[in-house]
């Protein structure tokens, strides 16, 4: 760990100068109490993200992670690395971070470390050097699946995330397969569903639409009011760090004894409920316009997780002193 915290903050870098990395940089600079970004790492010398970082007084490199490694002063000073590149890039970079003893907060679907969704398991993995934030669709929908599963058994969860095509940069487009696989697994591991499925749609509509998510769960029989109350409680938790997170309508409960459902390759369900939850997520408009709620929920989650790691580092440092 780094030895100097002269301004009471933990130094970090952002690897990836695209939409997500740039939005995260702006959030850290505006809102972080415990984090100090000292470098943005990219691979395109003409990147708008690198240019913006320079204007904000942040050091930059377009030589990838090698550009950071050349700066021994920063390597020694930095404790936290935010990975905002692609799943393939993180798989290559992660062993380097581990060898350096740095905490990696992974915003790609690489899923090398344990999953973290702030309102569900924020403080569970602070002893790990690598944690994964799943995907934007996962951060948006897993809290809702968990809200249902903490009340009643969820046999199956399926989510459809629709995002504006303009908000999806090259990294997002490269990660489509990883998105569906990692999000589906997150619905099971963190959301509590026995089986999960995820679909992403890049919507080219003009003007661009804000992020919309449809969440379907198949549950055992239970009191629908208990589920409804749990959902609204969880929405309030997410809104604490993503103010634009909203339900589009009341949760919809379809009784399966009247409308049975067959999931190909999984089974037929004739008892319980199909619960439908409709979400809309408006971004804060820090880097991209407000329609990019998919960016906002990811970078907001990253900031929340990074703050907690930084608090832990500062607390341990004060105990040592």
Image (cartoon, rainbow, N blue to C red):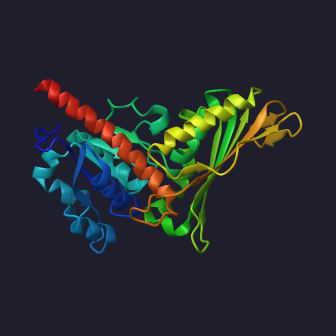
Q: Nearer the viewer, residue 43 or 309?
A: 309
Can the viewer see residue 194 in this picture? Answer: no
* Residue 273 image position (x, y, % from top left): 78, 35
For image coordinates 49% across by 65% down, the residue present is 167
For image coordinates 32% across by 71% down, the residue present is 47
Can the viewer see residue 216 in this picture? Answer: yes
* Residue 319 image position (x, y, % from top left): 16, 24
| Quarter in which the N terminus is drawn | top left
* Residue 102 image position (x, y, % from top left): 24, 41
Image-quadrant location for residue 4: top left
Q: Nearer the viewer, residue 69 or 243?
A: 243
Q: Quick one: which residue is furthest to the right in this view?
A: 258
Q: How many marks?
A: 0
Q: Is residue 174 above or below residue 269?
A: below
For image coordinates 30% across by 37% down, the residue present is 309
Image-quadrant location for residue 204: bottom right
| Quarter in which the C terminus is drawn | top left
Q: Nearer the viewer, residue 72 or 37?
A: 37
Image-quadrant location for residue 10: top left
287 left or right, relative to 255: left
For image coordinates 61% across by 27% down, the residue present is 150
184 left or right, relative to 268: left
* Residue 17 image position (x, y, % from top left): 33, 63
């Amino acid at each position: 760990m780094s030895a100097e915290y002269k301004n009471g903050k933990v130094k970090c870098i952002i690897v990836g100068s695209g939409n997500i990395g740039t939005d995260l940089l702006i959030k850290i600079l505006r809102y972080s109490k415990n984090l100090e970004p000292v470098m943005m790492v990219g691979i395109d010398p003409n990147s708008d993200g690198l240019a913006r970082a320079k204007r904000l007084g942040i050091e930059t490199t377009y030589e990838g992670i090698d550009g950071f490694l050349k700066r021994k002063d920063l390597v020694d000073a930095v404790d936290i690395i935010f990975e905002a590149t692609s799943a393939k890039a993180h798989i290559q970079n992660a062993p380097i971070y581990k060898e350096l003893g740095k905490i990696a907060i992974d915003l790609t679907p690489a899923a090398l470390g344990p999953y973290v969704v702030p309102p569900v398991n924020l403080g569970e993995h602070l002893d790990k050097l690598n944690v994964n934030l799943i995907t934007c669709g996962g951060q948006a929908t897993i809290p809702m699946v968990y809200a249902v599963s903490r009340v009643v058994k969820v046999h199956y969860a399926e989510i459809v995330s629709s995002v504006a095509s303009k908000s999806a940069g090259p990294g997002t487009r490269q990660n489509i397969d990883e998105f569906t696989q990692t999000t589906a697994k997150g619905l099971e591991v963190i959301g509590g569903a026995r089986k999960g499925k995820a679909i992403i749609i890049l919507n080219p509509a003009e003007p661009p639409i804000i992020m919309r998510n449809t969440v379907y769960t198949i549950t055992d029989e239970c009191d629908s009011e208990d589920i409804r109350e749990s959902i609204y409680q969880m929405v309030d938790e997410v809104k604490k760090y993503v103010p634009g997170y909203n339900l589009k309508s009341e949760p919809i409960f379809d009784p399966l004894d009247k409308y049975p459902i067959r999931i190909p390759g999984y089974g037929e369900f004739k008892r319980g409920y199909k619960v439908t939850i409709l979400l809309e997520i408006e971004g804060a408009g820090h880097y991209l316009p407000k329609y990019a709620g998919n960016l906002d929920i990811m970078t907001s989650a990253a900031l929340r997780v990074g703050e907690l790691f930084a608090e832990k580092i500062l607390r341990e440092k004060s105990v040592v002193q």
